[in-house]
Image (cartoon, coloured by chain):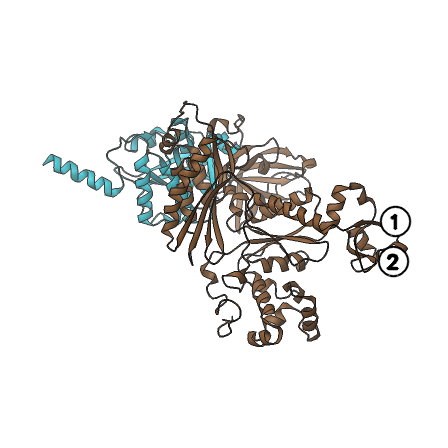
Chain colours: A cyan, B brown
Amino acid sequence: MTLMLRDLRARIARIEGFSPERKTQACPTGWKAVDTILPGGGLLEGALHEIHSPDPADGAAMGFAARLLGRLQARAPARAVLWASCRADLFAPGLHAAGTDPQRLLIARCRDSEELLFAYEEGLKSKALAAVFGEIGELDFSLSRRLQLAAADTGATLVLLRPARFGAEPSAAITRWRAESCPGGWALTLFRCRNGRPGHWRMSEKLGECR
Amino acid sequence: MSVNVGVSVGGSAFPGLFDSLRPARRIAAAWLPNFSVNLSIKTLPKLKESPLVMFQHEAGRSWIIAADPAAQALGIGPGQAVADARALYPDLQTRAADPAGDRSALEKLADWCGRYTPWVGIDACVGPGEAGLFLDLTGCAHLNGGEAALLADIEHHFARFGLDARLTLAESPGAAWAWSRFRPAGATPILAPGAAGLALRPLPIEALRIPAATAETLRRLGLKRIADLAALPRAALAARFGADLLRRLDQALGRAGAGPDNEPIAPRRPPTSYSVRGDFAEPLMVPEALGAVLARLLPRLCRLLERDGRGARRLVYTLYRIDGTSAAAAIGTSHAARDPAHLAKLFQPRLETLDPDPGIETLTLEAPETAPFVSDQNGLTHNEDAALADRPTLAGLVDRLANRLGADRVGYLAPHALHMPERQNRFVSALAAGAPTDLSAWSAWPATAAVTLPLRLFPVPERVEVETPGARAGDPPVSFLWRGHLYRVARARGPDRRLGAWWQGESAGRDYWAIEESAGRRLWLCRDLATGRWFVHGILAPGCGACKMQS
């Protein structure tokens, strides 16, 4: 009976995009209030995560992504991170000042979402990367599941920045976040979290302070 | 729109009907209008000092066949007798023309062009003293940083050889030829696929590569432009002027079907010792065969490379069809590679672009560019290829991405010691010559003091409309319009003055301000010191260390 249950659980996890054979690890965000809410104590590695931004002129989502990028880089010092996007506006001195290492950032400038998906999949499959970061608009559920499975297979983390208007559409992402500037700071919302509960935090000016 | 059905002249009965199914050809025409005089000046530089003409003996007199731009400016040109021109301009320099020497120089130049593509043809429709080449660049541009960069590179090298050249790129030799000679001033040298039909219409009929006598007859009939001809019924044109004119018209407007009328450019191979081929008694018809043959050829080529301790940087897989046409797929690698499995994977997406129809009789695989093969530090000597195939290498990923997206689209950001932000992070292609694929060799970023810097930087600062200016001169505006929205500045930090290296083409200087607007968004504003205008140059992230505000 227990065997059957375990088998069933594994199958469901597989369908949901988990790879139960691989031991999963989590990368802490470094914000205690956030990490305590996340299952595993941080951002699950080998999984798809989405960060939504309400407005292209709002840098909060990018700031959150840069923080995760720095943390993921610190956990795998010998590996590169791929940044695949249709935009060509990353500013390396700024990323550097924000605690990331632009030296270990491979950049792919794509033209359309077909090329983006190709780059994400190749990046995840290559086993040479610690993480893949990307920016994409439309992403239908089956494609997101495919990316989630590819990430789960190799253990590389995929973080996608997306416009907030896609927040209502289904996605296989393990966590979905929204980051938004507000006067004097910014707000971070975890609006979907597989095996966890949502959360909302007000971040103040100083790094790491939550209210 | 017209569909040309009913008249069958020369080749296909339906010219143009199936063209959209085939990947567009990209043919460059290089017109060298002063080839003879350029060559003379190259061998004897002092000829540059005064006007120069080339002459030939005929009927007991010396006739000018080519004149350099200085002589042309004096009104001296082909067809004049040397004696007459000398009488008017005593300091005119003359050199005997050497058609055989010019021809062999042109052949050498064509061979040299093999660095861009093996398909280089010599243009037969040139006047005396001129020369021309065709280069089939289909599928080559992505390895050379795009079409514009590729043309610029060819032009640059020709200029270095001392050759005046006009280069154009179009979908057929006919269109490229016409565009190189008759392109209106200021028009782009590159005609996008499908653009030739429209762009060539206003050009004179001489752009069609027709004999002078035909051109004159047409002109007398009032048919002066290509558009005039294109508007006429095809059957009538063919009946009155022969199939030749129609063929030239179709070739220029990109309506020629497959076959010899389409002017395939014969490959011109520079000798390479790394080449293997497969010949087939029965023509190969199915696209799947391309992958199967490649899988047999790759190990053979890799063994040749291994014998010499080398690896391939560029591979070209060429198919020769039974109708005399050919097509090729090329890949580039970021490091010397000779692992058949890895190379096969790189070729995979390219194979779809190869159309076997109507049948392949020969397939070749060549490595025109090779480099010494360096086995990695782990001291793998034998079987290193097998080991590499399984190893997670960044170089392998770079290759796959660059072959799909283009070499100019995969790279990293390198620091630059200039002060203007847009020049501080230079995008460097990972496949660029000398670009390392080893992480530790990438340009290390210097440590920066914790200053306020954006995470996103616009390539060009975006102008804002100041609604309410700041209290003092030089202060950021109280409110401004940007991208159609009104922003009110709540807090500001600055200025961070950047003085540009104006002697290197940078702007004189800017004051940068980090501002927080009323809704909390943070932008990187700058004021141009020369004009006092305000711009948004980047987007700052709140709370990520790089952006700390003071009240």
Left or right for B3, reference B507 = left
Amino acid at circle 2: Asp
- Both on one chain, marks 1 and 2? yes
In this picture, is B377 found above or below B254? Answer: above
Q: What element carries label 2?
A: helix
| Disc marking residue B20 | none
Is tag 1's residue or tag 2's residue first in the polypeptide sequence? 2
At a point 63% along the width and 48% down the height, the residue shown is B107
Distance between mark 1 and mark 2 Cα atoms: 13 Å
| Disc marking residue B84 | 2
Q: Position of residue B60 (x, y in %)?
A: 83, 58
Q: Can residue A20 be seen in this view?
A: yes
Q: How crowded is mark 1: few (under 14 residues within 10 Å), some or many (20 or more)?
A: few
Amino acid at circle 1: Asp
| Disc marking residue B91 | 1
Q: Where is residue B501 in the image (x, y as percent from the top left)?
A: 67, 34
In the rendered image, which quarter is residue B254 located in? bottom right
- Number of residue marks: 2
Q: Position of residue A37 (x, y in %)?
A: 29, 33
Left or right for B475, reference A50 = right
Q: Which of A72 and B67 is in front in this view?
A: B67
Q: Can residue B466 be seen in this view?
A: no
**Residues at circles 1 and 2 in contact by the CB criterion of under 8 Å:** no
Q: Which chain carries label 2?
A: B
At a point 47% along the width and 56% down the height, the residue shown is B23
Q: Nearer the viewer, residue B15 or A91?
A: B15
Q: Which of B499 and B86 is in front in this view?
A: B86
Left or right for B181, reference A184 = right
